[in-house]
Amino acid sequence: MTVALVTGATGFTGSHLVRRLLAASYTVHVVVRPASDLEPLASVRDQLVVHVHDGSTAHLTAILQAAAPAVVFHLAALVLTGHTPATLVPLLESNLVFATQLVEAMVSAGVSQLINTGSYWQHYEGQDYNPVNLYAATKQAFEAILQYYLEAAELKAITLVLFDSYGPADPRPKLFNLLAQAARTGEVLALTPGEQLLDLVHVEDVAEAFLCAHRHLRTLELHAHERYAVTSGRHLTLKEVVAIYERESGLRLLVRWGGRAYREREVMIPWSGGRALPGWQPQIRLEEGIGKLSEH
């Protein structure tokens, strides 16, 4: 069986990827922090090899050497829509220091295949690079660091640029959780004027994209780095998404449109300049995905 190592495995997307890898008969190792909550992996915990990283490069190298994975899926990140002086160091440690330690450990352990995770927030106003926030800047900065390793070491990589994901049991305070809470309580939900376009991809489709990326990565030569957009290919305004949610869920919402201002550097039109991942396309339409939400 193919051995995979996953970072960010306790996150929403990461935990879905872990289950998809297991279903595809991968042997799965995960790297977690001492304080990580393993509850999202509870249903498959006995099928995993869990490594608790002490924060050092030497320990991460030892983990990579012991696991000897064919591929590393790097999803770990601290995602912040806006930073503060207090979150500056954690943001850099999570998104730059740890990520660089990971690639250094891969090179030392002789692991050559990496699936990295990017964000459409790196492409404000559709530009090749214009970060929406400091989080997006750290994602871009790591890609620059990764390029050094790709040039200097026996390594190849694919970066998957992710858009907004959703799905059942999402612990994040994202749109559909806010809508469900408003429907339960009957409270009036203050939203922006609702004209921004959203690109929503079901988490099961996102997980499948990572497996598809690994199949493609196997065919690439060493030192290659390819970038693909994991997009639904369908842009809907926030108002349209809320209307679809009401129709598919059967719930009625009290929304005060314009009750909240657009945030600074709000993405009004998602980036559409990415390449399509060979062999992958989304299978779950938003209407179907919202229906699945109501089943949980």
Image (spheres, rainbow, N blue to C red):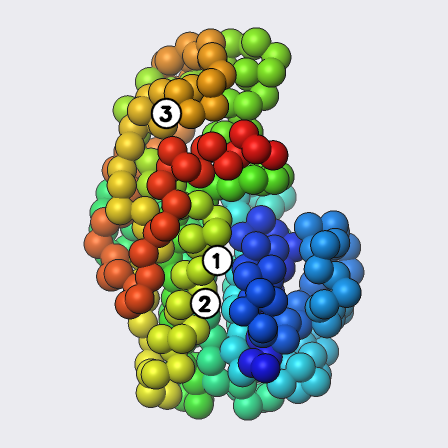
Is residue 144 visible to the viewer in this orientation of the structure?
yes
- On residue 29, which mark appears? none
Residue 235 coordinates in the image, percent (x, y): 27, 37
Q: Residues within 10 Å of mark 3 (few under 14, many from 20)?
A: some
Mark 1 and mark 2: span between their CA atoms?
A: 7 Å
Quote the CA–CA distance across marks 3 and 2. Answer: 30 Å
The amino acid marked with disc number 2 is Leu
Q: Which mark is residue 207?
A: 1
Q: State the residue in front, 192 or 205.
A: 205
- Residue behind mark 3: 244
Identify the amino acid type marked 3.
Ile
| In-front residue for pair 236/54 | 236
Circles 1, 2 touching at the beta carbon (< 8 Å): yes
- Circle 1 — which element? helix
Q: Is residue 225 left or right of residue 10?
A: left
Q: Tag 2 or tag 3, which sits nearer the N-term?
A: 2
Mark 2 sits on what residue?
211
Instruction: Tell me the quadrant of the picture where the N terminus can be found.
Output: bottom right
In the rendering, at what x and y percent does residue 199 appear?
A: 33, 41
Which residue is depicted at the point 56% across and 40% down?
168
- As drawn, 95 above or below 244: below
Q: For this view, does 63 lie left or right of residue 21?
A: right
